[in-house]
Image: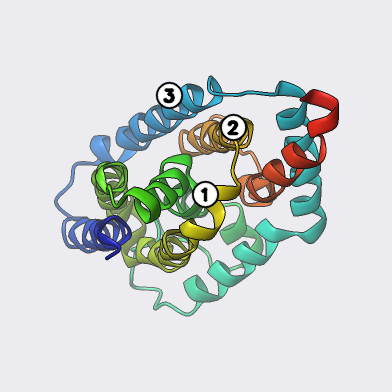
Amino acid sequence: MPVGPFVDCALTLLGAIVGTLLRGAVPRNIKDQMPLILGLISMSLGIVMILKIKQTPIVVLATVLGSAIGIGMHLEDHIKNGLFKLIRGRRQDEHNFSTTTIDNQQDQIKNNDRLEQLIALLVLFSVSGMGIFGALNEGITHNSDMLVSKGMLDFVSALIFATLLGMLVAIAVIPQALVLFGLFYSAALIMPLMTANMIGNLSAAGGILMLATGLRLSNIKTFPIADMVPILIIVMPLTWLLLPVFG
């Protein structure tokens, strides 16, 4: 039974609901400062994961190629367009998306800081290193500890951002569930094919993505993190293909 994926998704949804209900009661300074703390946590976890790297040249190559693929496919632009349609369809008297009034013009919405944070949350909840390894590990060992721990962090993150974005945060549960349950049920096929180098390089690639996500959540630098997701897809095949070169 996929306990970890279910708990993680349920806690994310619960956090979105609780945060939306409390959005009028949470002080402004907490709303403004907590995203910085959550961004710091994401960056810290990313650094820890990067330290597990096995073959630096392969991870660098995967980062460059994967990002180029995502940017070429305009992945982030497609996500922004979809979110824009959802936001524009909401009533103007509902201020769930931002603490200030938002003009419904597309360019202004796309450049809104809260939308940037929402995209970062989609990536953080769905394809973080903890989620990927937790789902694969539970699929083999039936140990849900990692995903339960991630669920607690996701609950707090969803709650805080729901005080700013409202129930839009709950959108993240959809890709989150697809990724976690998909990895859980495919773990028996994937894990036997993974080597120590593949696991280490995947961890480092996930760490790079989490580091970029933390910088974005903190509004320090807006990395195209949705465009960077293909890094996680190509890093293991590259590790296998370049085995004769790097050993």
Tell me: 106 left or right of 4. Answer: right
Would you say the residues marked 1 and 2 are in contact, meaning their CB atoms lie under 8 Å apart? Answer: no
Q: Nearer the viewer, mark 1 or mark 2?
A: 1
Q: Is residue 216 above or below residue 104?
A: above
Give the labeled residue for mark 2.
208
- At horizontal 67% and vertical 46% (from top left) the residue drawn is 228
- At horizontal 16% and vertical 56% (from top left) the residue drawn is 22
Give the labeled residue for mark 1.
191
The C terminus is located in which quarter?
top right
- Residue 59 position by quadrant: top right
Give the labeled residue for mark 3.
44
Q: In this view, does 211 lie above or below 152?
A: above
Circle 2: element type? helix
- At horizontal 27% and vertical 60% (from top left) the residue drawn is 16
Q: Which of marks 3 and 1 is in front?
A: 1
Residue in front for this viewpoint, 246 or 172: 246
Residue 201 placed where, x, y %? 62, 32
Q: Residues within 10 Å of mark 3 (few under 14, many from 20)?
A: some
Picture disc at residue 56: none
Q: Which amino acid does label 2 sit on?
A: Ile
